[in-house]
Amino acid sequence: MKKEIALVAAVILFGLAYGLDYIAGPVSIRVKDPVEFFSNPVISKYPLTAVAVSIRSIAILTSLVLILSLIEKKYLLKVFISLFIGGIFELYAIQQIATGGRTTPIQWTLAFSYAGFLLLPTIIFYIIKGIITGIKDKLGIKEEKTYPQPIFEDKEKDKE
């Protein structure tokens, strides 16, 4: 159920970012690096675009974490995948901004950069979770799965 909610949230966030980009109109932002975008002179000129970039970054992060959640328990693999994707996002943004690339709009380029940066807490979480799981496996502690009790019990079964 949680994965479906995350999927719907990501889709809604992408839609909201597109809507804000549409309202803001086309922009021509000249920045030398992704950090410069959130400096006072630039953000004061493009506040709606800044909100759209932030929302898009969160949507990209949510999508990546959702995809990684499909891999069961292999936390070290998740760490390596997250590091690789985050690094590629950062390198891509630096390359696009430095060369004035036209592969993606600047809003997407900045969103990739910030999503790569936002992967750091996720990577730390996967490292900690992997260590804890490894310790539990070495000690032989098994997790018991508990299932929620139904709120409404079947009245027909009680009558029989």
Image (tube, rainbow, N blue to C red):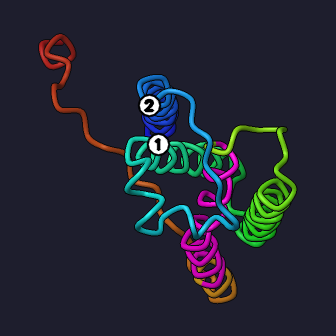
* Label 1: few (<14), some (14–19) or many (≥20) C-alpha neighbours in 10 Å: many
Q: Residue at x 62, y 68 (%)?
A: 117
Q: Which mark is residue 136?
A: none
Q: Is residue 130 magenta?
A: yes
Amino acid residing under circle 2: Ala
Dot 1 and dot 2 residues touching (CB under 8 Å): yes
Q: Position of residue 1 (x, y in %)?
A: 44, 34
Q: Quadrant of residue 97?
A: bottom right
Q: Secondary structure at mark 1?
A: helix
Q: Which residue is mark 2?
A: 24
Q: Is residue 117 magenta?
A: yes
Q: Which residues are magenta?
A: 108-131
Q: Position of residue 15 (x, y in %)?
A: 48, 25
Q: Residue at x 47, y 51 (%)?
A: 54
Frontmost residue, 103 versus 70: 103
The answer to whether 36 is drawn above or below residue 149 in the figure is below
Frontmost residue, 7 versus 33: 33
* Quadrant occupied by the C terminus: top left
The answer to whether 155 is drawn above or below residue 36 in the figure is above
Q: Which mark is residue 49?
A: 1
